[in-house]
Amino acid sequence: SYPNAADTAFAKSKGKSPGGDIFIHGQPNGWAGPAIPRDWTDGCIALSNAEIAMLWKQVDDGTPITIQP
């Protein structure tokens, strides 16, 4: 449901784009260093590559995920 009307209005009031999708993902492509110790994304849920590999093994493709504030 992101971005909904309220998200779009808030972003517009700040002169920003609301973006489009929220993803759960590992480190940036090509990243070879240690896990980045903070959330470096603009709204996504960032995990270490080891964490995303573990999640990938435990959750089937197509599983609905609800993200709540």
Image (cartoon, helix red, strand yellow):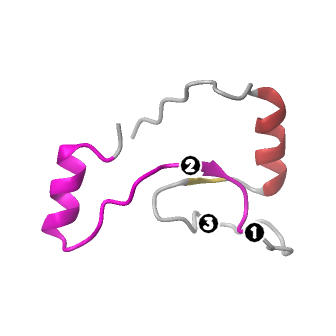
User: Mark 2 packing: few (<14 Cα in 10 Å), some, or many (20+)?
Assistant: few
Residue located 80% across and 28% down the image: 58
How far, Cα to Cα, is label 2 from label 1?
14 Å
| Residue underneath mark 1 | 29
Q: Does the magenta stretch include residue 14?
A: yes
Vertical placement of residue 37 versus 52, above or below: below
Vertical placement of residue 41 versus 69, above or below: below
Tell me which amino acid carries mark 3: Arg
How far, Cα to Cα, is label 3 from label 2?
16 Å
| Residue 38, numbered label | 3
Q: What stretch is highlighted in magenta?
A: 3-28
Q: In which quarter of the view is residue 20 placed?
A: bottom left
- Between label 1 and label 3, give the one nearer the viewer: 1
Lower sequence index among marks 1 and 3: 1
Tell me which amino acid carries mark 2: Phe
Numbered disc 3: secondary structure? loop
Lower sequence index among marks 3 and 2: 2
Lower sequence index among marks 2 and 1: 2
Q: Is residue 39 magenta?
A: no
Q: In which quarter of the view is residue 37 placed?
A: bottom right
Residue located 71% across and 29% down the image: 61
Residue located 83% across and 44% down the image: 53
| Residue underneath mark 2 | 23
Residue 60 shown left or right of residue 34 in the figure: left
